[in-house]
Amino acid sequence: MPRFFIPAAQIKQSHAALTGAEFHHLSHVLRLTVGDSLTLCDEHGRDHHGTILSLSATKAEIFLTASSLPEAPVFFLTLAQGVLKGQKMDLVIEKATEIGVQRIVPFFSVFTVAQLPADRRSERVSRWQRLAQSAAKQSGNPVPQITTPQAFADLLATIPDGVGKVLLYEKEQTLTLKAFAQTYPSFSSLCVIVGPEGGFAAGEVEQAQTAGFQIVGLGTRTLRAETASIVAVALCRFLWGEREIPPLP
Ligand code: SAH
């Protein structure tokens, strides 16, 4: 079933209007036509099933036949990522969404190399949101929330108690993520922090520790930041994520 992203505001009771790039994809790329069935997913993780009622040059009117509420995630994963240069950050947003994160928090720290002037931040967040929307659509995952980039100290201060907290540090050669998971096998919410290209300053690692973060390593090799993030999301989901329930035969 073809899937399209639609802002919830464009859904009125049993009717939805698909416009813009998603309309283009429906009409000109997939060449769907009146009567065809499709699924629309919104930013709240809901799926809406329907059929195409009419097509104009700029929009498709869709009649909705059923909507499903998202299942509350058993495991809420937040990826806090030091802002990376252009395409590397795009890659992390895309792959993390595809594998499954509920929230992405970009941050600036001492060794951040990516330049992101204040006046370009909201434009960049919109770009990341668009990338997340299409990755969510492609994978069938809900669209993660992406916050405005914040300072590292603010990130540490805003993760509430009761959330599992880990920071990935390549110099941590004793405690691995796996060993940490063996000690704390169940979290319903976890925040994992991955540094920017330049890594963390020793003082930042101490700050994170003081804020209740467990410092963990991923083994003896130093991974590139974007690799570390993608690996971390996959491992966290594997170690703590909800089990997939197979469909009934
Ligand atoms: N400071 C280093 C490398 C930074 S790697 C340097 O420039 O030489 C970027 C980020 O990826 C790190 O901040 C860390 O969060 C993560 N990372 C990479 N390899 C890792 C490993 N083996 N264990 C844990 N984290 C790792």
Image (cartoon, rainbow, N blue to C red):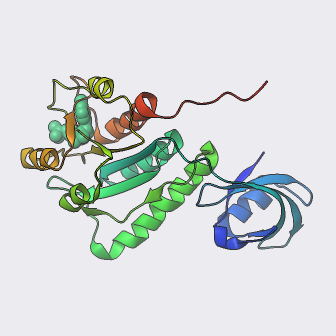
146 horizontally vs 245: left or right: left
Q: Residue at (43%, 53%) from the top-left corner?
A: 103
Left or right, 183 with reference to 127: left
- Residue at the location (84% across, 55% down)? 32
Q: Closer to the camera, 113 or 37?
A: 37
- The reply to whether residue 86 is in sight is no
The residue sitting at 18% across, 59% down in the picture is 153
* Image spot of residue 51 (x, y percent): 86, 58
Instruction: Work out whether 152 lies above or below 237.
Output: below
Q: Quadrant of ligand 1?
A: top left
Give the image location of residue 72, x and y in percent.
Answer: 56, 48
Q: Residue furthest bottom?
A: 119
Q: Is residue 20 above or below residue 35?
A: below
Q: Residue furthest right?
A: 35
Residue in the foreground of this view, choosing between 117 and 132: 132
Query: Count of labels shown?
Result: 0
**Quadrant of the drawing holding the C terminus:** top right
> Does residue 195 appear in the picture of this structure?
yes
Q: Quadrant of the N terminus?
A: top right
Identity of the residue furthest to the left in this view: 203
Q: Is residue 165 left or right of residue 248?
A: left
Q: Is residue 35 above or below residue 78?
A: below
Query: Residue 7: x, y in percent?
Result: 63, 67
Instruction: Give the answer, above or below, for where 120 lies relative to 159.
Output: below
Q: Residue 122: x and y, percent? A: 39, 72
